[in-house]
Image (tube, rainbow, N blue to C red):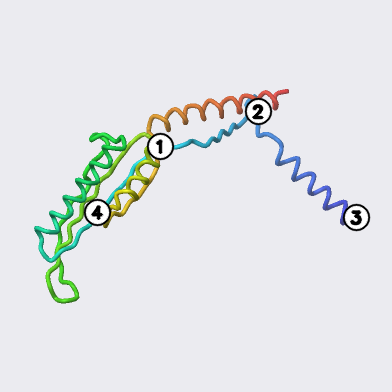
Amino acid sequence: MKKYLTILTFLLLTLNSFSQNSSGNELTAEGIAKTKVKPDLASFRISVEKRNLVEKTSIKELNEEIEKLQKLLLRIGFTEKNIKISEYKVSSNENNDDKKEYTTLNTLVVEFNLNNKLIEAFYQEIQNENLKDADIEFETQVSEELEKTTRQKLVKSAINEAKSNAENIAN
Protein backbone atom coordinates (compact mmCIF):
# COMPACT_ATOMS: atom_id res chain seq x y z
CA MET A 1 0.00 0.00 0.00
CA LYS A 2 2.82 2.36 0.91
CA LYS A 3 4.38 1.65 -2.49
CA TYR A 4 1.12 2.57 -4.31
CA LEU A 5 0.79 5.82 -2.33
CA THR A 6 4.35 6.81 -3.22
CA ILE A 7 3.73 6.12 -6.92
CA LEU A 8 0.42 8.00 -6.84
CA THR A 9 2.04 11.02 -5.17
CA PHE A 10 4.86 10.99 -7.71
CA LEU A 11 2.39 10.86 -10.63
CA LEU A 12 0.35 13.75 -9.25
CA LEU A 13 3.46 15.90 -8.79
CA THR A 14 4.72 15.01 -12.27
CA LEU A 15 1.42 15.79 -13.95
CA ASN A 16 1.23 19.10 -12.11
CA SER A 17 4.73 20.13 -13.19
CA PHE A 18 3.99 19.48 -16.88
CA SER A 19 0.67 21.29 -16.98
CA GLN A 20 0.38 24.83 -18.31
CA ASN A 21 -0.89 27.76 -16.36
CA SER A 22 -3.97 29.21 -17.95
CA SER A 23 -6.48 31.80 -16.93
CA GLY A 24 -9.48 31.94 -19.22
CA ASN A 25 -8.33 32.13 -22.83
CA GLU A 26 -4.67 32.79 -22.03
CA LEU A 27 -1.90 30.28 -22.62
CA THR A 28 1.71 30.74 -21.53
CA ALA A 29 4.57 29.39 -23.63
CA GLU A 30 8.24 30.20 -23.18
CA GLY A 31 11.17 30.04 -25.54
CA ILE A 32 14.88 29.85 -24.84
CA ALA A 33 17.81 30.53 -27.15
CA LYS A 34 21.52 30.06 -26.53
CA THR A 35 24.59 30.53 -28.66
CA LYS A 36 28.35 30.84 -28.42
CA VAL A 37 30.04 33.78 -30.07
CA LYS A 38 33.66 33.97 -31.13
CA PRO A 39 35.19 37.30 -30.07
CA ASP A 40 35.96 39.64 -32.94
CA LEU A 41 38.26 42.12 -31.17
CA ALA A 42 41.62 41.61 -29.50
CA SER A 43 44.14 43.73 -27.67
CA PHE A 44 47.66 43.56 -26.37
CA ARG A 45 48.65 45.56 -23.32
CA ILE A 46 52.43 45.90 -23.35
CA SER A 47 54.18 47.46 -20.38
CA VAL A 48 57.88 48.24 -20.44
CA GLU A 49 59.69 49.27 -17.27
CA LYS A 50 63.26 50.52 -16.86
CA ARG A 51 65.22 51.25 -13.68
CA ASN A 52 68.36 53.30 -13.25
CA LEU A 53 70.09 55.46 -10.67
CA VAL A 54 70.03 58.33 -13.16
CA GLU A 55 66.56 59.58 -14.12
CA LYS A 56 67.63 60.78 -17.57
CA THR A 57 69.21 57.40 -18.37
CA SER A 58 66.11 55.53 -17.20
CA ILE A 59 63.89 57.65 -19.44
CA LYS A 60 66.30 57.30 -22.40
CA GLU A 61 66.44 53.49 -22.06
CA LEU A 62 62.66 53.30 -21.84
CA ASN A 63 62.14 55.52 -24.88
CA GLU A 64 64.61 53.43 -26.92
CA GLU A 65 62.83 50.20 -25.96
CA ILE A 66 59.39 51.68 -26.76
CA GLU A 67 60.62 52.97 -30.13
CA LYS A 68 61.98 49.51 -30.92
CA LEU A 69 58.62 48.01 -29.92
CA GLN A 70 56.62 50.46 -32.04
CA LYS A 71 58.75 49.71 -35.11
CA LEU A 72 58.21 46.00 -34.52
CA LEU A 73 54.41 46.50 -34.31
CA LEU A 74 54.33 48.55 -37.51
CA ARG A 75 56.55 46.03 -39.31
CA ILE A 76 54.20 43.09 -38.62
CA GLY A 77 51.10 44.92 -39.83
CA PHE A 78 49.65 47.08 -37.06
CA THR A 79 48.97 50.73 -37.86
CA GLU A 80 49.58 53.80 -35.75
CA LYS A 81 45.80 53.93 -35.30
CA ASN A 82 45.99 50.54 -33.51
CA ILE A 83 48.73 51.64 -31.09
CA LYS A 84 47.96 53.91 -28.14
CA ILE A 85 49.96 55.02 -25.12
CA SER A 86 47.83 54.32 -22.09
CA GLU A 87 50.33 55.11 -19.35
CA TYR A 88 53.65 56.88 -18.90
CA LYS A 89 55.08 57.16 -15.44
CA VAL A 90 58.34 58.19 -13.77
CA SER A 91 58.82 57.45 -10.10
CA SER A 92 61.65 57.22 -7.61
CA ASN A 93 62.42 55.37 -4.42
CA GLU A 94 65.44 54.23 -2.45
CA ASN A 95 67.02 50.91 -3.34
CA ASN A 96 68.75 48.46 -0.98
CA ASP A 97 71.95 50.57 -1.01
CA ASP A 98 70.02 53.66 0.18
CA LYS A 99 70.46 55.28 -3.22
CA LYS A 100 67.69 56.96 -5.14
CA GLU A 101 66.56 54.77 -8.04
CA TYR A 102 64.29 55.92 -10.84
CA THR A 103 61.67 53.72 -12.43
CA THR A 104 60.09 54.65 -15.73
CA LEU A 105 57.09 52.84 -17.12
CA ASN A 106 55.33 53.08 -20.46
CA THR A 107 52.28 51.03 -21.39
CA LEU A 108 51.07 50.63 -24.95
CA VAL A 109 47.67 49.24 -25.85
CA VAL A 110 47.28 47.68 -29.28
CA GLU A 111 43.64 47.16 -30.29
CA PHE A 112 42.71 45.32 -33.48
CA ASN A 113 40.21 43.01 -35.16
CA LEU A 114 40.97 39.46 -34.10
CA ASN A 115 43.52 38.04 -36.52
CA ASN A 116 45.43 34.88 -35.62
CA LYS A 117 48.20 35.59 -38.13
CA LEU A 118 48.89 38.97 -36.53
CA ILE A 119 48.94 37.41 -33.06
CA GLU A 120 51.36 34.69 -34.13
CA ALA A 121 53.59 37.22 -35.91
CA PHE A 122 53.57 39.45 -32.83
CA TYR A 123 54.76 36.72 -30.46
CA GLN A 124 57.31 35.47 -32.98
CA GLU A 125 58.78 38.95 -33.40
CA ILE A 126 58.84 39.53 -29.63
CA GLN A 127 60.94 36.37 -29.28
CA ASN A 128 63.21 37.31 -32.19
CA GLU A 129 63.81 40.88 -30.96
CA ASN A 130 64.51 39.76 -27.39
CA LEU A 131 62.68 42.72 -25.88
CA LYS A 132 63.66 43.23 -22.26
CA ASP A 133 61.56 44.31 -19.31
CA ALA A 134 58.30 43.86 -21.23
CA ASP A 135 55.11 42.51 -19.69
CA ILE A 136 52.46 41.47 -22.22
CA GLU A 137 48.76 40.87 -21.57
CA PHE A 138 46.39 39.60 -24.24
CA GLU A 139 42.61 39.67 -24.21
CA THR A 140 39.71 39.26 -26.57
CA GLN A 141 36.23 40.70 -26.51
CA VAL A 142 33.03 40.92 -28.48
CA SER A 143 32.34 44.20 -30.27
CA GLU A 144 29.14 46.13 -29.62
CA GLU A 145 27.97 45.46 -33.19
CA LEU A 146 28.45 41.70 -32.89
CA GLU A 147 26.79 41.66 -29.47
CA LYS A 148 23.79 43.59 -30.84
CA THR A 149 23.29 41.35 -33.87
CA THR A 150 23.71 38.23 -31.73
CA ARG A 151 21.10 39.48 -29.26
CA GLN A 152 18.68 40.12 -32.11
CA LYS A 153 19.20 36.60 -33.47
CA LEU A 154 18.71 35.12 -30.00
CA VAL A 155 15.46 37.02 -29.47
CA LYS A 156 14.13 35.83 -32.85
CA SER A 157 15.12 32.26 -32.06
CA ALA A 158 13.50 32.40 -28.60
CA ILE A 159 10.29 33.84 -30.11
CA ASN A 160 10.21 31.06 -32.72
CA GLU A 161 10.68 28.44 -30.01
CA ALA A 162 7.90 30.02 -27.92
CA LYS A 163 5.58 29.97 -30.96
CA SER A 164 6.39 26.32 -31.55
CA ASN A 165 5.75 25.52 -27.87
CA ALA A 166 2.43 27.37 -28.00
CA GLU A 167 1.37 25.43 -31.11
CA ASN A 168 2.27 22.14 -29.40
CA ILE A 169 0.28 23.11 -26.32
CA ALA A 170 -2.73 24.22 -28.40
CA ASN A 171 -2.80 20.97 -30.37
First reached walking from the N terminus: tag 4 or tag 3: 3
The residue located at (23%, 42%) in the rendering is 70
Q: Are marks 2 and 4 in contact (CB under 8 Å)?
A: no
Task: Kindly report the distance in space between the C-alpha atoms of the residues bearing marks 2 and 4.
Answer: 57 Å
Mark in front: 2 vs 4? 4
Mark in front: 1 vs 3? 1
Residue type pointed to by label 4: Val
Please tell me whether residue 93 is drawn above or below residue 83 in the rendered image.
Answer: below
Residue type pointed to by label 2: Asn
Number of numbered discs = 4
Helix, strand or loop at disc 3? loop
The outermost residue toward the bottom is 97
User: Mark on residue 165?
Assistant: 2
Q: Do the residues labelled 1 and 3 touch (CB within 8 Å)?
A: no
Quadrant of image for the C terminus = top right
Q: Which of 59 and 44 is in front in this view?
A: 59
Badge 1 is on which residue? Answer: 117
Residue type pointed to by label 3: Met
User: Mark on residue 1?
Assistant: 3
Q: Quadrant of residue 30?
A: top right
Helix, strand or loop at disc 2? helix
Q: Residues within 10 Å of mark 4 (few under 14, many from 20)?
A: many
Q: Residues within 10 Å of mark 2 (few under 14, many from 20)?
A: some
User: Mark on residue 48?
Assistant: 4
Q: Residues within 10 Å of mark 1 (few under 14, many from 20)?
A: few
Q: Do the residues labelled 2 and 3 touch (CB within 8 Å)?
A: no
Left or right? Give the position of 139 relative to 32.
left
